[in-house]
Image (spheres, rainbow, N blue to C red):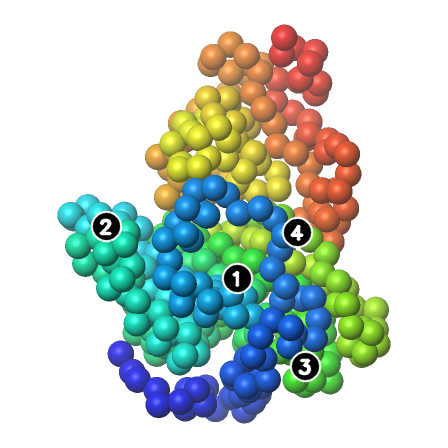
Amino acid sequence: MFKLQNETELTFKGCTTCTTLNCVKHEYYGKTLKKTSDLKSNACVPSAKPVPAYVRKVIAEIHPDVVANCSHLSLSNRHFLLDEGPSPSTQPCPDRTACDVFVLQLEVARKYIDYHTQRFGYKKPNVNFVQGYIEALAEAGLEEKSYDIIISNCVVNLSPDKASVLREAYRVLKDGGELYFSDVYSDARIPEDLKANKVLWGECLSGALWWEDLMRLAEEVGFCKPRLVTASIITVGNKELEKLLGDYKFVSATYRLFKIPKGSEKKSCLVMYNGEITGLEESFEFDAQYNFKVDKEMEVDDDVASILSSSRFSGEFTFQHQHSGLKTSSSGGCWDKPKVMSVNPFELVQQLGSASVTPSTGGCCGDQQACCQ
């Protein structure tokens, strides 16, 4: 593992644009922004969505210095968190690797490794903090097909090379692995003159990817079609920046990207959720379309069927392939059907704000009340 003496030593060979924009990122987050009130827009302000009780319980155990450092500019997730998944050995919990480019963030995290190891009841540390760019995970020592899941929050937009970010994520994920991430997206491609604006870039606005480019890049890299989980409109809240941005609109959206093994069978089927995921004992909201209720069969399309059967979720479901002419599930009742939701995050915001969402046709009947008594 390499050790950097300062933030600016790590650069991309032969890529002037990447190096320049990353220097902008270092300057903005390392020097310009010292506290949340230094932000010039609403783009980086965390969501007001309630944190689940089981997550709040874990946060309460984190050392106050780490919480303070993470609360600073909401940078707690401005890195990739990579999870190796359960181990067949005696390791009580999966190993995790956090990749961040900022030295100070890593120093605080490393300082309290022993504290948290003891606090959470582990005999040895199960987390490793490495310095590096998410566009070059190999240079940070992250090996191919090593991780089950990557979690990221509002950091991909700060990368000057989104395609490399996705390629590296795909490379280090195991077959069936997932990139689960929230980020800022635009309703059109952002021009170069706006990307060159240091404030707009640092505020997570001009670096935003056009949502249609995400769909294209993900499939070019090898991921299955991105699954849109949720979305909310971002308001800039700064007249000067709004004037520069003109008619461009932005949204915060969460996607799931899965690395499905090549040659996997894709066939729609019925699935039943067993309710064994911690905190999701009654239902599992997989994405905007699918909300699986415990012990209730649901029809899934070929993509979702492949994802569920090939990923870490395979043990959370039972699968039943449909046959021609099948009218009811094996349990004798009607199965649930997915909602009809847009893949466009801007349209999804409008749908989520609607009083009702129409379920798709198909399954045992068009109107569930007609046969599900």
* Disc 4 to disc 1, C-alpha distance: 13 Å
* Residue position marked by numbered label 2 in the rendering: 121
Q: Count neighbours of disc 4 (C-alpha within 10 A) and say few if under 14, some if 14 to 19, many if 20 or more.
A: many
N-terminal-most mark, 4 or 3: 3
* Residue position marked by numbered label 1 in the rendering: 153
Residue 133 at x, y percent in the picture:
43, 77
Residue 277 at x, y percent in the picture:
40, 36
Q: Nearer the viewer, mark 4 or mark 3?
A: 3
Q: Count neighbours of disc 3 (C-alpha within 10 A) and say few if under 14, some if 14 to 19, many if 20 or more.
A: many
Report the amino acid beneath label 1.
Asn
Report the amino acid beneath label 4.
Ala
> In which quarter of the view is residue 219 placed?
bottom right
| Quarter of the rendering occupied by the C terminus | top right
The one nearer the camera, 72 or 196, is 72
N-terminal-most mark, 2 or 3: 2
Residue 292 at x, y percent in the picture:
52, 31
Instruction: Kindly identify the residue that appears in the image at 37 percent across and 58 percent down.
Output: 62
SS at mark 4 in the image: strand
Q: Nearer the viewer, mark 2 or mark 4?
A: 2
Q: Count neighbours of disc 2 (C-alpha within 10 A) and say few if under 14, some if 14 to 19, many if 20 or more.
A: few
* Disc 1 to disc 2, C-alpha distance: 27 Å
> In which quarter of the view is residue 290 placed?
top right
Report the amino acid beneath label 3.
Val
Residue 301 — which label? none
SS at mark 1 in the image: strand
Q: Count neighbours of disc 1 (C-alpha within 10 A) and say few if under 14, some if 14 to 19, many if 20 or more.
A: many
The one nearer the camera, 149 or 103, is 103
* Disc 4 to disc 3, C-alpha distance: 24 Å
